[in-house]
Image (cartoon, rainbow, N blue to C red):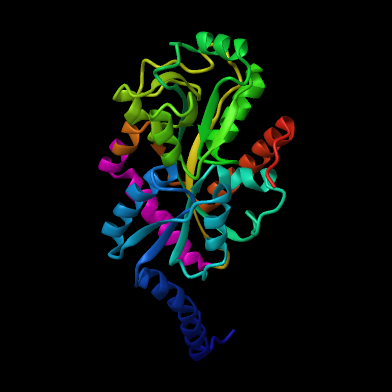
Amino acid sequence: MKINLRRVALALTLTLASFIPGLAMAQAYPAKPVRVIVPFAPGGPSDIIARITAQKLSEAMGQSFVVENRAGAGGTIGTDAVAKSAADGYTVLVSNLPFAITPSLYSKIPYNATHDFIPVTLIASGPMLLVTHPSVPVTNLKELLALLRAQPGAFSYGSAGSGSSAHMATEYFSMLTGVKMAHIPYKGGGPAMTDLLGGQFQLMIESMPLLVPHVKQGKVRAIAITGSKRSASLPDVPTFDELGLHGYDVSVWTGMWVPAGTPKDIVARLQQEVARAIASPDIKERLAELGTEGVGDSPEQFAAFVQAEIAKWGKVVRDTGMKVE
C-alpha cells in the first residue's frame, strides 16, 4: 500500500493544531486575577483554608487569587454567584460540607449542585470538635449529656447558619443522644465564634481550624472530637467513639469547584497547582496546626466523594426531619 506522505503530514498538522489552543490556554492561564468566592462570612473554616490556599496559588501562578466572601442563605448566595459566572477559570468556589447538604435541606435552591459545577479538588479534610464555653459546669461528655438531659432546651448552640456543617453535625449529635438544644444560626463561623467566646450561647460543634486556636488559648473547653482517631493538634481530647458514642463520625471538608463548561485544561491546571500548594511543607504544617490535612485529589475522585456526601447527608436530613424554606 502506497502511503501519501503529504496527506499524513497534513493530518498530523491538523491534529497538533487542535491541541494547541487548549495548550496555549492552559499555559497562559491565569492572565488576570482570579476571584475565589467563599459563600460564608470571614473567619470560618472555608475562609481560613481558602486564604491559606489562595496565597500559595498567587505566589505559584503569578496572578492574585482574591478571596471574596458572599455569605447568606446557608452558602447558597455565594454558590449561585459562581454557578452564574463565566466558565473561564477566573471565578472559583471554595466551600465545604453545606455544598452537599443544601440540595436536601432547602426546598428550593437556584442552582443544581451536580450539573452546574465541575469539581476541581478536595483541598482539605478533618474532624470536628465539640467545645463548651468555660461557664458551662462540665469537663467531659458524660457530664455534658447529663446536664443537657436534665434541662431540655435550656442550653443553646451556635452555627454558621442553617444547613452549615456545625448545624448538621449538632442536630445529628442531638438525634443520636436524645438531647434538646436551641439553635442560634449566624451568617458564618467567624461571627458565631465571636458570640461563643462572649458567652451568648453555650456550646458548638465546628471544624478544627476554627476552634483549635481558642482551645489552646483556654477560651473554650474541648470535650470530644469526631473521627476515628485523636488529633495531633489536640492529643489529650478523646474521640466520641472512645467515649461510647459509636457511629458519630463526622468530618468537615473544604473543596474547590468551577462553573460547568470551564475548559478541562484549566480545571487540570487548578487541581495540579492546589495539590502542589497544600503539599508544600509550610502549608502542611499550617493545616496540621489547625487539625486538618490537605488532600488534593483528582476532579473525578472529588466528584465521586461529593456525590457520596450528598447521599449521606440527604439521609440525615430525612431522618431528622429538618427542612429550610
Residue 41 is left or right of residue 235, and the answer is right
**Viewer-closest of 59 and 217:** 217
> What residue appears at the point 41 percent right and 73 percent down from the top-left corner?
25
Measured as percent of width and height from the top left, residue 108 is found at: 70, 53
Magenta residue check for 270: yes
Picture quadrant of residue 324: top right
Q: Position of 233 compared to 78: left or right?
A: left
Asked if the stretch drawn in magenta spans residue 264, the answer is: yes
Question: Relative to the observer, which residue lies in front, 169 or 77?
Answer: 77
Q: Quadrant of the N terminus?
A: bottom right
- What is the quadrant of residue 222 in the picture? top left
List x then y, in percent, for residue 26: 40, 69
Q: Is residue 324 left or right of residue 184?
A: right
Q: Residue at x 60, y 17 (%)?
A: 246
Residue 249, image x, y percentages: 56, 25
Which x, y percent locates residue 12?
48, 81
Residue at horizontal 62%, vertical 43%?
Answer: 101
In front: 311, or 26?
311
Q: In this view, does 202 lie above or below 91?
A: above
Rendered position, 10 above or below 258: below
Per the picture, the main secondary structure of the magenta-coloured stretch is helix
- Above or below residue 266? Residue 280 is above
Q: Is residue 292 visible?
A: no
Asked if residue 45 can be seen in this view, the reply is yes
Give the total number of marks visible in the rendering: 0
Which residues fall within the magenta stretch? 262-285
